[in-house]
Image (tube, rainbow, N blue to C red):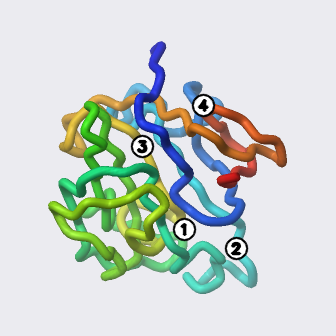
Amino acid sequence: MEYKTKTSLVLPFNGTWKVTNGGRDSSTNNHIREDGPQNQLYAYDFRKEHVGGGKELEDYEVFGQDVLAPADGIVVQVVNGAIDVPPGERDRSVGVGNAIIIDHKNGEYSLLCHFKHNSIKVQVGDEVKQGEPIGNCGNTGNTSQPHIHFNLQDGPQMYNSKALPAQFHRIIVNGKEKQNFEPTREQEVSNP
């Protein structure tokens, strides 16, 4: 799909994280599969390796870290009641876990998932600014370890919207600055 992102996006976190799913090919993005949800085709997963044994949520450096608004917009949906599950377990009954959808007022919407239980700081109708903390990274929903799931879509509904490729306006990728870039699996990324 040829698509140029209209929204000037930043990465939804501080510091350097690893892309564990990203790109437009199934070899770098597990979200791209025939039997998978079509609304997540170009989704990203961002995480860091764990310290210690990796059996406790606190073993993961990202657990509890701020999740940032990737761009200005209005919050149109919030899910905030899911409980964090231990690493390696999944709560498929609430697949997205705790989540936020932001309307960027140009036909693009950001979906961010797996927030820590009761950490979301915004409500439906709130206006958010790019880079503003909106919650904390958790391990809620269908996830095996703490991380941030991010995807861009063309509507406000999680499962009925069409996935859109998301290029980040300016990011650092493996130590080099890139513009309007779609990172892929194994790349280390940060905001400039």
The front one of 21 and 77 is 77
Residue lying at 68% horizontally and 59% vertically, measured from the top left: 17
Q: Nearer the viewer, mark 3 or mark 2?
A: 3
Question: Which residue lies under the disc numbered 2?
Answer: 50
Q: Residues within 10 Å of mark 2 (few under 14, many from 20)?
A: some
Question: Which residue lies under the disc numbered 4?
Answer: 180
Q: Amino acid at mark 1?
A: Gln
Q: Nearer the viewer, mark 1 or mark 3?
A: 3
**What's the CA distance linking mark 3 and mark 2?**
24 Å
Question: Which residue lies under the disc numbered 1?
Answer: 145
Residue lying at 38% horizontally and 35% vertically, measured from the top left: 36
Residue 168, image x and y in percent? 56, 39
Residue lying at 82% horizontally and 42% vertically, measured from the top left: 176
Q: Between disc 4 and disc 3, whose residue precedes? A: 3
**What's the CA distance linking mark 1 and mark 3?**
18 Å
**What's the CA distance linking mark 2 and mark 4?**
30 Å
Numbered disc 1: secondary structure: loop
Residue pushed farthest left? 125
Left/right placement of residue 182 relative to residue 52 reads: left
**What's the CA distance linking mark 4 and mark 3?**
15 Å
Residue 108, image x and y in percent? 31, 35
Left/right placement of residue 138 relative to residue 79 reads: right
Q: Between disc 1 and disc 4, whose residue precedes? A: 1
Question: Which residue lies under the disc numbered 3?
Answer: 151
Note whether 35 is above or below 52 in the view shown: above
Q: Amino acid at mark 4?
A: Asn
Numbered disc 3: secondary structure: strand
Q: Is residue 93 visible?
A: no
Q: Between disc 2 and disc 1, whose residue precedes? A: 2
Q: Between disc 3 and disc 2, whose residue precedes? A: 2
Quadrant (top left, top right, bottom left, bottom right) of the N terminus: top left
Residue pushed farthest right? 175
